[in-house]
Amino acid sequence: MTEQQPDPSTAADSPDVLTFPPVIYATFFIIGIITDRDLSHSMEFYGFRHPSGWALVLIGTLIVAWAVARFVKAKTHVDVRKPATTIVTDGPYKFSRNPMYLAATLLYAGIAVSFGKTVTLACLIPCLIVLHYGVIVREERYLEAKFGDQYRNYCSKVRRWI
């Protein structure tokens, strides 16, 4: 019996990202928290706690709410694993092509700083590398293939992060 190949015309309309981005952030955050906890139990290790971290949390929360509201108004999917129906270019998308990822990064960093979780904060670096290659690059490829010049024009005017 021969295996039938899927017809490309009926293939799923999605960017084929590694996973839902909050899973990436949560995974690295949990790794950082566990490592921070183990270090503080095995040696005199205390991170630098700073209340300014809560400002990052607040800013991140406001940005993600604004970005999600723009997606809802445009009637497109917030979940990157689902098909994009349009390119959102207003609201926070005038300043960043990825305001939701920027907001998640601010939330992550803000919580880590507020609670003095130094290793957790350091884990943000590999988290962003995985996010870049596992989500952002794939999503950009998908959007360029789907929307062509409209997306390329948007990319030429708006930075990836800020």
Image (cartoon, rainbow, N blue to C red):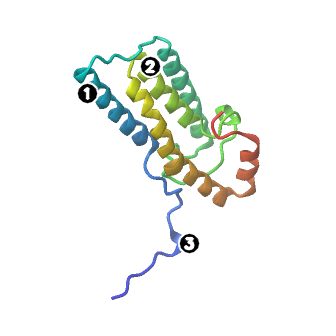
Mark 2 packing: few (<14 Cα in 10 Å), some, or many (20+)?
A: many
Residue 46, quarter of the rendered image: top left
Instruction: For mark 1, give the secondary structure.
Output: helix
Closest to the observer: 37 or 78?
37
**Residue at the left extreme?**
41
Mark closest to the chain's N terminus, 1 or 2:
1
Residue 45 position in % (x across, y down):
32, 18
**Residue at the bottom extreme?**
1
Q: Looking at the picture, does residue 47 appear above or below residue 83?
A: above
The residue identified by callout 2 is: 113
| Amino acid type, callout 1 | Asp
Residue found at x 63% / y 36%: 161
**Quadrant occupied by the N terminus:** bottom left
Mark 3 packing: few (<14 Cα in 10 Å), some, or many (20+)?
A: few
The residue identified by callout 1 is: 38
Closest to the observer: 73 or 110?
110
How far apart are the two marked residues, 3 and 2, measured between alpha carbons?
A: 48 Å
Dot in front, 1 or 2: 1
| Amino acid type, callout 2 | Val
Residue 69 position in % (x across, y down):
57, 33
> In this view of the protein, can residue 68 be seen by the observer?
no
Residue 18 position in % (x across, y down):
45, 52
Mark closest to the chain's N terminus, 3 or 2:
3
How far apart are the two marked residues, 1 and 2, measured between alpha carbons?
A: 18 Å
Dot in front, 1 or 3: 1
Mark 1 packing: few (<14 Cα in 10 Å), some, or many (20+)?
A: few
The residue identified by callout 3 is: 9
| Amino acid type, callout 3 | Ser
Instruction: For mark 3, give the secondary structure.
Output: helix
Closest to the observer: 38 or 43?
43
